[in-house]
Image: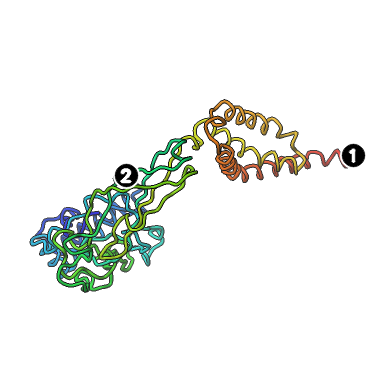
Amino acid sequence: MATMNEKDYYAVLGVSKDASQQEIQKAFQQKARKLHPDINKAPDAEEKFKEVSEAYAVLSDKDKRARYDAMRAGNPFGGASTQPYDGGYAGGYSGGYDPFSGFPFGGMGGFSTHRRRSRAAYNPENGADVVVEIELDHDEAKEGARKAVTYRHYEPCEHCHGSGSVATEHARTCPTCGGKGTMNVDMASLFGAGVFQVLCPECGGSGKVVADPCPDCGGSGRSAVTSEAVVEFGPDTHDGDMVRIKGRGHAGTNGAAAGDLVGRAKVASERLEGKAASGFNLIGFMLPFVIFSALAGVLSVFAIVCFVPMIAGIIMVLTSDVLHRSPLWWKRGMQQVVSGAANGVFLAMVMVWFTSCTQRAFMAPYGRMM
């Protein structure tokens, strides 16, 4: 995710660097009208609208604009670019904050976003786990095995020892948002509404920035590396079993605790795939129809609908090699049956209820005649 001093807000709004406040406001109004999600249904309209709003929130304020220009020219954060690798990291930057909360009209009420973290932002968060899937054959799973893995992850920066700061560990108030973590955008002239908030692009919503960002990591306190580890699986390991190595996952930001390295076993001989999985799922899907129609006394009506697919599912299971290669085929099969039943239960209830009511209504006149 691009940080504040990496973004060209002038290009986002389509104005020159010496544009007046009136030109900036006019450009924002034109783009915002076109990109508003209530009007523009393009998949990327929401994200572009947020970007335009963020640019306007910075450039429409003289002090913020002056600071942004200085950051772009002098780059006081030592080239604070985004991390070169995220390794599937989902836990370290995400947050529950919604910058469009309190938006004055309902069309934006469904907006959601993730906290964006500039590398110079001070926001200690524990590192996420790194999950590595490791293939084991039948004998290795049965007897146990040691497997070497190579993986990419974040580790604490050697220069600042993970704090993100060189000379002091104390953070300072974000000068862009004044510690609020958000910036206001006045929409009164555009939609006749009031003010709504966007996330501060410098501190990422934390309200604090690193006082003297490390030149090596830019203030995040960590850098991307490639590491090796040995994951040991014990005897009688099964598909999906996990081994956890403490502290070998992603390093946390600004000195927070590291996540774990998790080795997850993939035992091909125990995996239920292809025809066998589809067959068990089909059997499970039809089971609610059999049960509900039998209880309602209309099983004869559903006989063909129920038993033909079930027989087809049984044939799919028997013609696969799951019974021979997987010692836990019944366990995986039952999981698929339950999954299929969960998908079919509502449809079965509706269809059986409708059929039962229709049958009673049809037979009612004949009952009175008798």
Percent x, y of residue 200? 25, 65
Instruction: Give x and y (percent) for residue 228.
Output: 28, 47
The circle on residue 369 is 1
Q: Is residue 61 left or right of residue 96?
A: left
Frontmost residue, 359 versus 300: 300
Query: Which residue sits at x=53%, y=34%?
Result: 326
Looking at this view, name the residue that lies furthest to the right. Answer: 370
* Dot 2 crowding, Cα within 10 Å, few <14, some 14–19, many 20+: some
The residue tagged with tag 1: helix, strand or loop? helix
Dot 1 or dot 2: first in sequence order is 2
Note whether residue 315 is visible. yes
Q: Can residue 91 be seen in this view?
A: no
Give residue 295's quadrant in the image. top right
- Mark 2 lies on a secondary structure that is strand
Task: Inspect the image, locate mark 2, and give the three-letter code of the amino acid beneath it.
Answer: Val
Q: Residue 342 carries which label?
A: none
